[in-house]
Amino acid sequence: MINSVCGIRSTGRICTDLADALTAQGHEVRIAYGRETVPEKYEKYAVRIGSPIGTKLHGLRSRIFDDTGFGSKRATQRFIEWVKSYDPDVVHLHNIHGYYINAEVLFRYLVKAKKPVIWTLHDCWPFTGHCVYFDYAKCDRWKTGCHNCPEKKVYPASVIADRSRRNWADKKKLFTGVRDMTFVTPSQWLADLLKQSYLGKYPVKVINNDIDLTVFRPTEGDFRQKNGLADKKILLGVASIWDRRKGLKDYIRLSEKLDDSYKIVLVGLSEEQIKQLPDNIIGISRTNNTKELAEIYTAADYLINLTYEDNYPTVNLEAQACGTPVISYRTGGSTESAVRFGTVVDKGAVEQVVKLIQSSPRFEKSPDYEASLGHSVEKYLELYRAR
């Protein structure tokens, strides 16, 4: 597998959860990654691509030239030599943006090696000229050819050049050159978009994200007592990175409309963001301690997911598995996951969120809720065997 991170955050945990299950069935797995550190228990899978300095240089280059995915050439060449010696039966791609790998070097190898490729999409970057999502900008240039990108200054941000037209053409040429490739999307929403893109000629299968149900389950802890919230109704928000699309401003708007019987708790904020929060919001920095996260989910009354752009948020699944219902914006695949134990409202409809919360709704889990979790490994194995 190839992904930006290993064993941390949503995509990294998806990779290691899958690796654990595959290893238990007798398969051999390696996860090539490019960023941050790997939890000790997952080091057995980890293969580092490049170095922290290399990713910083790739990121700097991208900010100037808008060529995310086209730096880290030497690091990727060295990695490909390792891949040749490892000789995998299947190459499973995840996020290949993130300033750590060169898409051109990677795909030239994949075309020449004729290895079966599975590519799980966690966003829209593989079929755009720049952005990972385009809902916010209401842009559909990705369908025919990107140019004059309205999201140029949004991750992967460029402060000078706009290379979106060339990026779109280069990625189209590279990514459509692989003969044996199957796409996986966690949501039907993303599958429908993929079919409208230049990757639409490839087969696509929807496999919902799984979570580790041995970790994410009702887990009692002292979170309420430790934070003076014993008699409060807790409204929880969780994200790996709180950027514009995660709706941070809407949580602040929400806090202004609630009395002091409620407390909003946001997990995953930077130290600078925490300093800027109003008094009625508790900010917690990012945690990769999944047991601690399960305790926070369990303590909350609702997970409030005010994301404006998303694929199939694992936070929705994690909260539900801990017995906490979800109220989410009607966004991408969040719509598909939230309604299993919760509901959705229109983007920006903070007043509607307030009314829902104050009415104390009792959500019922959908009949297929439990059956829908824990089966992605079997579905991926079917794909691997079919190759």
Image: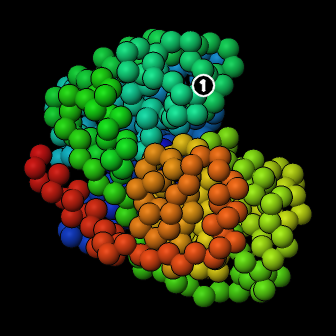
The one nearer the camera, 48 or 263, is 263
Residue type (three-letter) at the residue carrying disc 1 = Glu
User: Disc 1 marks which residue?
Assistant: 151
Would residue 328 be visible to someone looking at this image?
Answer: yes
Q: Does residue 267 lie above or below 140 as drawn?
A: below
Would residue 287 be visible to someone looking at this image?
Answer: no
Residue 33 placement, left or right of 304:
left
Res 126 quadrant in image: top left
The residue lying at 32 percent from left, 75 percent from top is 367
How far across and down, in percent of the image, does residue 219 sit? Answer: 56, 85
The residue lying at 89 percent from left, 63 percent from top is 279
Q: Does residue 230 lie above or below 21 as drawn?
A: below
How far across and down, in percent of the image, does residue 173 sit? Answer: 30, 17
How many numbered dots are placed on residues in this image?
1
How far across and down, in percent of the image, does residue 178 sit? Answer: 21, 28
The one nearer the camera, 240 or 358, is 358
Res 238 quadrant in image: bottom right
The one nearer the camera, 185 or 334, is 334
Residue 173 placement, left or right of 158:
left
Q: Does residue 36 lie above or below 131 as drawn?
A: below
The residue lying at 87 percent from left, 51 percent from top is 276
The residue lying at 65 percent from left, 60 percent from top is 353
* Mark 1 nearby-residue class (10 Å; few <14, some 14–19, many ≥20): many
Residue 117 placement, left or right of 140:
left
The one nearer the camera, 259 or 197, is 259
Colour convention of the picture: rainbow
What kind of element bears circle 1? loop
Residue 358 placement, left or right of 218:
right
How far across and down, in percent of the image, does residue 239 sit? Answer: 61, 56
Q: Residue furthest left?
A: 386
Q: Does residue 362 lie above or below 128 as drawn?
A: below
